[in-house]
Image (tube, rainbow, N blue to C red):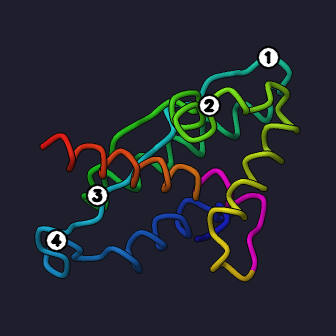
Amino acid sequence: MYAMPDTLVLLYGLFQDDFDNFDVRYGDNSPIALLENVGFHRPGNSAVASCTFARHCGALEMALVASRIPYTKVTPGKWMKTLYGDALPREKTERKEYIYQQTKLAHPELPKLFKYQADALGMLDYMIREEKKNEVQS
């Protein structure tokens, strides 16, 4: 897992380094991505933060398209509610801390977990849960 790179070139480079020719290497197990369906202004966030976040969302989506990596989108509310139910705090700082602590508990194999990684791991856990649910229904 990586922190968001400082430039678009570095971001795209991550996709090329990790996934170049993934369809040849992985066959039927080609990687897929899950993006948060976000990128709009939230009350309480600064305009600058909202714009930066929206640009990052668009850059990630374009890097996936350019790298031919299929993706789906999920709202933060859906993946968070699926994993944490009603226990999730409403206030952003408390919610982020809660997700971080829950992620640490769910992944004791990780020697060091940074707070910026918690949402991504939560989304991965959500995606795995949804895949297992789909396998059972099939």
Q: Disc 3 or disc 2, which is closer to the eye?
A: 2
Mark 1–mark 4 CB contact (< 8 Å): no
Residue that lies at the very extreme toward the front in this rendered image: 136
Secondary structure of residue under mark 2: helix
Secondary structure of residue under mark 3: loop
Whether residue 110 is situated above or below residue 57 in the rendered picture: below
In-image side of 65 versus 95 (left or right): left
**Residue at mark 3 to residue at mark 2: CA–CA distance:** 30 Å
In terms of sequence position, does the residue under pointer 4 or pointer 2 come before the other?
A: 4
Res. 134 image quadrant: top left
**Residue at mark 4 to residue at mark 3: CA–CA distance:** 9 Å
The amino acid type found where label 2 is placed reads: Gly
The amino acid type found where label 3 is placed reads: Ile
Main secondary structure along the magenta-highlighted residues:
helix
Whether residue 53 is situated above or below residue 97 in the rendered picture: above
Quarter of the image with the C terminus in it: top left
Res. 43 mark: 1
**Residue at mark 1 to residue at mark 4: CA–CA distance:** 41 Å
In terms of sequence position, does the residue under pointer 1 or pointer 4 come before the other?
A: 4
Badge 2 density bin: few <14, some 14–19, many ≥20, Cα 10 Å: few
Give the residue number, with chain letter if any, for mark 2.
85
In terms of sequence position, does the residue under pointer 1 or pointer 2 come before the other?
A: 1
Res. 97 mark: none
Q: Disc 1 or disc 2, which is closer to the eye?
A: 2
In terms of sequence position, does the residue under pointer 4 or pointer 3 come before the other?
A: 4
Work out whether residue 130 or residue 58 is closer to the camera in this orientation and state it: 130
In-image side of 58 versus 18 (left or right): right
